[in-house]
Image (cartoon, rainbow, N blue to C red):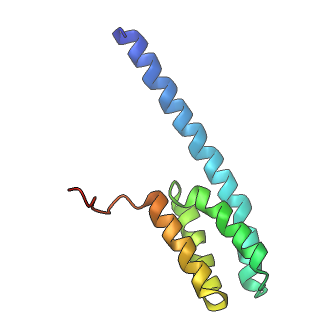
Amino acid sequence: MDDNTNADFMQDIRELAKQIKKITKEAVSLIEPQVNKVIRNKIKDNNQIELLLDRLLDYAGMDDDGLILFKRLCRYYYELNPKVTAEYIYIYRDLYDSDEVDDED
């Protein structure tokens, strides 16, 4: 690649990253009222809560607000179903926690 092609490519990547960030923010803002409703109304429907946790897993590692919502919902759900809540936390760590040390190192 020549310098112009490389610069254009990098600009395209930056634009894509901005679009992804914007879409992520919009998605999290749509999920937030649902999480607030579950917690405020003390909803105990496992399927509804787990659906929200599934959706939040998509954004928790890419957006601070998504992570905050994920944590809030996990704290709420832990009282209802600690085992499943722990599974969601492990899934989050598997997906996004890069601080783990590889066994091979």
Q: Is residue 81 above or below residue 13?
A: below
Q: Identify the residue at horizontal 64%, vertical 86% (top origin).
A: 81
Q: Identify the residue at horizontal 55%, vertical 38% (top origin).
A: 18
Question: Is residue 102 rendered to the left or right of residue 36?
Answer: left
Give coordinates of residue 97: x percent, y percent: 41, 62
Q: Return the residue nearer the eye: 95 or 76.
A: 95
- The residue sitting at the front extreme is 104
- The residue sitting at the bottom extreme is 79
Give coordinates of residue 4: x percent, y percent: 39, 10
Give coordinates of residue 90: x percent, y percent: 49, 71
Question: Is residue 30 rendered to the left or right of residue 23?
Answer: right
Question: Is residue 50 rendered to the left or right of residue 105?
Answer: right
Report which quarter residue 36 is drawn in. Answer: bottom right
Q: Is residue 13 above or below residue 56?
A: above
Q: Quadrant of the N terminus?
A: top left
Q: Quadrant of the C terminus?
A: bottom left
Q: Return the residue nearer the eye: 30 or 82.
A: 82
Give coordinates of residue 67: x percent, y percent: 54, 66
How many callouts does the rendering have? 0
Q: Is residue 89 above or below residue 76?
A: above
Report which quarter residue 39 is drawn in. Answer: bottom right
Report which quarter residue 38 is drawn in. Answer: bottom right
Q: Identify the residue at horizontal 65%, vertical 69% (top origin).
A: 53
